[in-house]
Image (cartoon, rainbow, N blue to C red):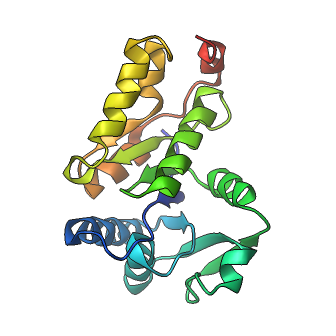
Amino acid sequence: MSEIKNICVYCASSPQIAPVYFKAAERLGCLLAEKGINLIDGAGKVGLMGCLNNTVLAAGGTVTGVIPRFMVERGWHHSGLTQLVETETMHERKSLMARMSDAVIALPGGCGTMEELLEVITWKQLGLYLKPIVVLNIQGFYNPLIEMLEKAIGQQFMRREHESLWQVAFTPEEAVELCVSLPAWDKKICKFAAV
């Protein structure tokens, strides 16, 4: 178990989603602030990301937002974050967010959120990211994705060992507890990258 100082959270930027997801983002934000854990995210000002950012800041916590310059130019960024880091590309953004983090939590989200989650799982499979990855499965949102990953394992597209690349939580409390209690991944797992 290692000390967790920075948690990267992937989440939706849509403001149109159900209140239950906003409540989960608010609770997660409060927990991060209470525990003195810096939030790293995509620096958005709306949707779950905006809610999470606002909650952490209002509770006295800190937020590092990482966002491509073109999004800043369009005014999509939150202007009140503790630190705003601009990147040239989306790829650079994702890489930097992962490098700065001690763990990842994925709240519900759309294509961008799921793409970030699957990419960091792939990096862990390859031994490039060794830290905890937690899927925060609010209201069973991620059930189809988890079932798809299980199907990939069952049909030998992935090894059974890969099932522990990620953990599933059902509450923000459980997600944060998993982040702080899980050990770092053994880099030797990359020998299982090829099925």
User: Which residue occupies 65% across, 55% down?
Assistant: 94
Left or right: 9 in relation to 167 = right
Where residue 76 sits in the image (x, y, percent)? 58, 82
Above or below — where is 168 with respect to 98?
Answer: above
Residue 60 shows in the view: no
Above or below — where is 54 with respect to 142?
Answer: below
Q: Residue furthest right?
A: 88
Where residue 96 sits in the image (x, y, percent)? 70, 57
Q: Nearer the viewer, residue 84 or 82?
A: 84
Residue 124 shows in the view: yes
Left or right: 177 in relation to 123 = left
User: Which residue occupies 49% across, 81% down?
Assistant: 45
Above or below — where is 10 with respect to 25?
Answer: above
Residue 28, by quadrant, is bottom left
User: Which residue occupies 47% across, 49% down?
Assistant: 114
Where residue 49 sits in the image (x, y, percent)? 45, 71
Q: The C terminus lies in which quarter of the figure?
A: top right
User: Which residue occupies 59% across, 81% down?
Assistant: 77
Q: Nearer the viewer, residue 92 or 161?
A: 92
Left or right: 74 in relation to 175 = right
Above or below — where is 130 with respect to 83?
Answer: above
Residue 27, by quadrant, is bottom left
Residue 85, by quadrant, is bottom right
The number of callouts visible is 0
Where residue 126 sits in the image (x, y, percent)? 65, 27
